[in-house]
Structure formats: structure tokens, C-alpha cells
Amino acid sequence: MEMISYYFERGEFLKSNNIFEDKKADIENEKFNIEDIGLIRILSAYLSDKKIDLNKISSLIITDDNTIGGIILRLVEIDIVSKENISKAKELLSQVNYRSKYPDDFLELINFSDYTSSKFTISKILFDIIDKLILKLEGAEEQRKLRLIKSLHYLYWEGNNVKKTELRLIEKDLKEELKATEKSELYEFLLEIYERLNDNKKYFITFIKAVESCRDEEKYIIEFSNFKELELDYVVDYICNNIKIYSFNQKKYQKLIETIIEELFKREKYNVIIRITENIDFKQLDYLEFGFELAYSYKELKKEKEAKKIYEEYMDKYPNSDATINNLGVIYEKEGNLEKALELYEKAENICHNKIYTNNIERCNNLIEERKKEEDKFLEALALFEKENIWVINELKLFYLDSDENNNVICSYKRLPSLLKCSESKSQELLNMFLDKNYIFKNKNHNYNTNSNVYRINIAIYERIKQLEKENILVSNFMDNLNNFTIENLKKLDYIETQQKLTEINNQRVKDIFIRDYNELVYNYLSNQSKTVVLMSGTIIELLLLYILELNSISKYNVGPKSKNKKIEEMDISEMLEVCTSEKLIHNAPKKFIDGMKNFRNFVHPGKEIREKLLEIDKQTIDLLMSTVRWLILTLDLK
């Protein structure tokens, strides 16, 4: 073979051909590339004797009958300078029932794009033939194809010696041909050029075009390991904005999505993986092929529900994936299902011994033991809970309502007062009591990314609170109404100022009565007890007016349209108000409203309420009553 190559390089084709004749048996017994040998023999015979008949040449080819068509095509590709041989070549093509890729058989005769070259140097001979053909042909299309043939052979033969400028020229030839024919096979050469140029963006776009134009879904495969960060960002943006997955194209993009997610996973870009799946209909794909990476990414982004679903589907398809089984166990553990978590950890350990799995098993067993001890504390806590007053129960309910799906409450000391709707000192006192009585437990083994304290609620107590609400709607109402007892609401009522004014009363017994009644009025107002507010406000107004009149030594007075003389204890509110106004004990008294309130008070007497079909005490009326009481207390001189 070295001698054949030597004479061939020197152009001594006859000597080259003679070696074939002399060493035919030896060549047949060696494992040479049959197609290469056949090609060299054809070239040697052709170039040493231009008059040789093509049929005779084909009979000398060392090859199997089932590959004769391929060898004839190589013979035809070389032997096209002579018009006479072109016609013979067409005959040979018809003999092997060969169908051209082009409308005109002649284009096939000059097409070298499918050519696999010999290891011998024949590029110069072929390029000379192509250059002669380019000069002979006048059609731009044929010339373009010949230039492309020459470029592709140059790309193949020169290998890594092709310069960047030459690669760009070959790129140009390929693009021109693709514009005219959209021949998908040419994308392979374009991809090779961009790979040599390290032009990853163009490589990716060309890859997409190749995938979209090719019927063989698995023909093109792309790797992203050498893509820089910005190039990978470009790929992700393109996929998210331009690729839509449908049932008819799912196979084309399956491998692409798998590969990009695999690379993103290696680079720990979990949010980008989720971004891609959110922008394409990934369930049209065989998404469990990248199910582990997808579930893991969900978990890293704290989307445990989505992660759990994908992990479980993945485990059904790949039941021996120990990493999947372990990671699913971590999710169950976080949910509080320790028994299920332990089962999964042990299953993962049985498949593959791993220190991580062993540690998870040990930790989970310890947590189960702690949980069993806590169950005894639950019973003790329930006994204590039954003795709690409604205010404490309501505060505990507020705390429980802030728990997440894993029965944990994340709460800092700073946030605690707003959560429990009470002062900082009182909220801390309540928290300590909840911990001491095991109504809540401090959770030190949580997976939350927080510096705040995490508390696990006593689910038995919570269930008892919900049971109480179902059993007694009154308890529920009280608990809900207690939410109005806040410092802010008391400030809106001028509660402290009003209390201080009442303390100015000198008579201790009268002072106690007023403070008691006013506190009861405020309590009922904040508890939304409308009817009681009406009754209590009327009582307080009546007592206030009576007290002021006695304080000013007025025992009788002429009141009403007929100026009837009455004792003050016999007067109604409107009459006492008339006296206080006449004696200038109060100023700007809302007389019409007081009259209306008096009538409304009479209206809600039991008999009246039973007889009437509709009783409605609106919020505006209640607010006005509270304002009137507050106004009177703050306006009157109580000393």
C-alpha cells in the first residue's frame, strides 16, 4: 500500500495499477478499506489509460457485489471530464437502479458531497477536475455546486489545517447552497465549521435548523459543556421564547431539552431549569428522562409539592433510583410524615450503601422517638387546655392560624406582638406559657432558610380548638370577637382619656359604678354585641345626667311643653337633657339624637322585639352611641 501511494503521488499511475494486478490475492486477504482500494484502482486505471472502458474498470473493482452501486458512483464522480464517459456513467447508474437526488442526473455526476475520501492524496487530481468543470459549465447553479464540492473535500482532507478565513469561505458556500436547496445533510458540514471556529451561538442556531429540517429525530445531538455562561443564557432565552413543544414535534426537541437541562443541572442553575419547563409544554415530552433534575430543582426552589409529584412519577418509572428515593424521603420528613420518610431512607440504603442515607435513617429514628415522647406531652397539654379562658384560647388560635402546611410557625420576637395582637411584654409572656404547657414546641431541626424561630404547633390542641368551634358556635363567636380587643381600637375610643375623666368623680361608690358600666359598654362594643351597646349606652347617659343634676343640687324642675314640675328621678333622658341644657350644665347637646336613642332603646325591649318582624341595629347607630357617651363624659364637669 505504501508503494501504491508512492507511485500515485508521483503521477506514475501505470506502476501503481500494476501493483494491483500483481498483488491482487494479497490485497484480497488483507483487511483494507475496500472502498479506498477500489477508488485508487479506478483512478490508477483511468489515469494510466484514458481509453479504458468503464465496464471493464468496474469488473476489476475489488469489492462485494452488494456495494457495487457505491463504487460505480465514485467511478462516475471521477470520470466526468469526457462527454463520452458521462453517457456511459448514466448507463451504469441505470444498471444499478440508482435514483438521483437532483432533478437532473448531471448534477449527481458532479456531486462529491457524499464522498468518503481515501487516505491517499487524491485531492489535487479531484480539484483539477472540478476547476476544469467550472470553466466548462456556464450555469451559475452548477458552478455553485462545484465550488461547494471542492470546499467540502478541502474541509475533509485538510482537517485541522484549514484556516479560519478558509472556514468562513466554506461557510459562505454552504449557506448559498442551503438557500437554494435546503438540503439537510449540508447542516452537518456547517455544524463542523462552527465547532472548529468555537462559534457556539451560530452552532446552536444551525443545530436548531438542522433538527427542524431533518426527519431523523436522533440524527443531531448537541453538547453544551463548552458553552460559556452568556452563550448558555442565549440558548435558554431562545428555547423559552421560540420553541414550543407539540405532539408532532416532541421527538425533534426531546434530546435538546434533555441535554440543556443536564448541563444546567451540572452548573446548579435550578431556577433556569424551572424557567425552561414553565415556558414550554414539557409534559408533551418524555419529561421523566430529566425528571430527577426537574424534581431536584423544584426542591431547591422550595417548591416541595411540585418536587414531590415529579419524584414520585420518576420513582415509578425508575424504582431503583436510590437518590430519588432518598430525596423523596427528605420531603416526607419535612412534611412531618416520619414513618414514610424512614421507609424511603431504608429503601435507598438497601439499593446503595451511602453515608448520607445512613445519617438520614439515624436522624429519622431519633425524631420518631422524640415524637413518641411528645405524644405524652400532648395528653398533658390537652388537660391543661381545658382549663384555659377564652382569651388565651383565642391567642393560641391566632398563633396556630399562622402555621404552614407542615404545621410550623416561623415567627421572630419582633413579629410576635402583631401576630398575637397584644403588647410586646404580653406576647412574650404568652409565648413562654405556650411553650411551658406544650401547646407549641420549638423546632430546631427545620429546613427553613430563616434566622427567625420556628415553632411546631401541637396538632392535638389545634384539633380540639376546631372541635370546640363546631360544638359551640358561641365559643367561636367569642373567640373571633376578641380579635377586636387591640390597643389600636382602644385608642380610637379614647379609652384612657375617658377612664381618667371618670376617676374625677369624688363619690367612690358612684365612680365604681360608672367605671364598671363604661368598661362593660366598651367590652360589648368591641365584641359586636349591638343590642347590649344600645341598652348600656342609654343606662350610662341616664346615670350621667342624673349624677350631674344631683351634683348641682337640682331635685325638681319644670320640664316639657306644659312645664310640669317633676322630680329628676322621674324624668326620662330627654327631660334631664332639657334641664342640663337650660342650666347650662352641658353645651351643644345632641338632643334629637338622644330622643332617637331613647325611642330605639324602647324599641328593643323584649316584647317589642318579639312583636316586630325585623330588627336591625346598624353599625352607624352603634358608633354614634359610643361617640355620644364618650362626648358626654369628656364634656361634663364631673367634680
Image (cartoon, grey):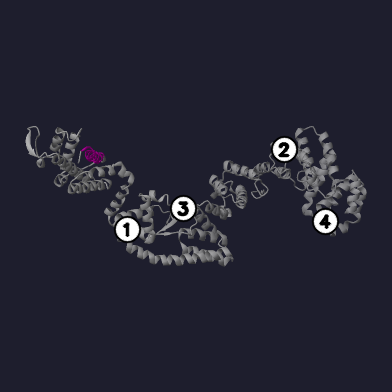
Q: Residues within 10 Å of mark 3 (few under 14, many from 20)?
A: some
Q: Residue type at mark 4: give it.
A: Phe
Determine the CA span between mark 4 and mark 1: 88 Å
The part of the image, by quadrant, that contains residue 33 is: bottom right
Badges 4 and 2: C-beta atoms under 8 Å apart? no
Magenta span includes 68: no
Determine the CA span between mark 2 and mark 1: 79 Å
Is 380 displayed left or right of 576 in the figure? right
Of residue 53 and residue 523, the one placed in the foreground of this image is 523
Name the mark nearer the viewer: 4 or 1: 1
Determine the CA span between mark 4 and mark 2: 35 Å
Q: Which of marks 1 and 3 is nearer the N terminus?
A: 3
Q: Is residue 593 visible?
A: yes
Q: Is mark 1 on a helix, strand or loop?
A: helix
Q: Residue type at mark 2: give it.
A: Glu
Q: Which mark is residue 32?
A: 4
Residue 197 picture location, percent across and down: 73, 43
Q: Earlier in the sequence, mark 2 or mark 1?
A: 2
For the point 77% across and 48% down, the residue is 96
On the image, numbered disc 3 is attached to which residue?
452
Q: Give the quadrant of the C terminus.
A: top left
On the image, numbered disc 1 is attached to which residue?
467
Q: Is residue 406 visible?
A: no
Q: Earlier in the sequence, mark 4 or mark 1?
A: 4
Name the mark nearer the viewer: 4 or 3: 3
On the image, numbered disc 2 is attached to which residue?
177
Q: Residue type at mark 3: give it.
A: Ser
Q: Earlier in the sequence, mark 2 or mark 3?
A: 2
Q: What element carries label 2?
A: helix
Q: Residues within 10 Å of mark 2 (few under 14, many from 20)?
A: some
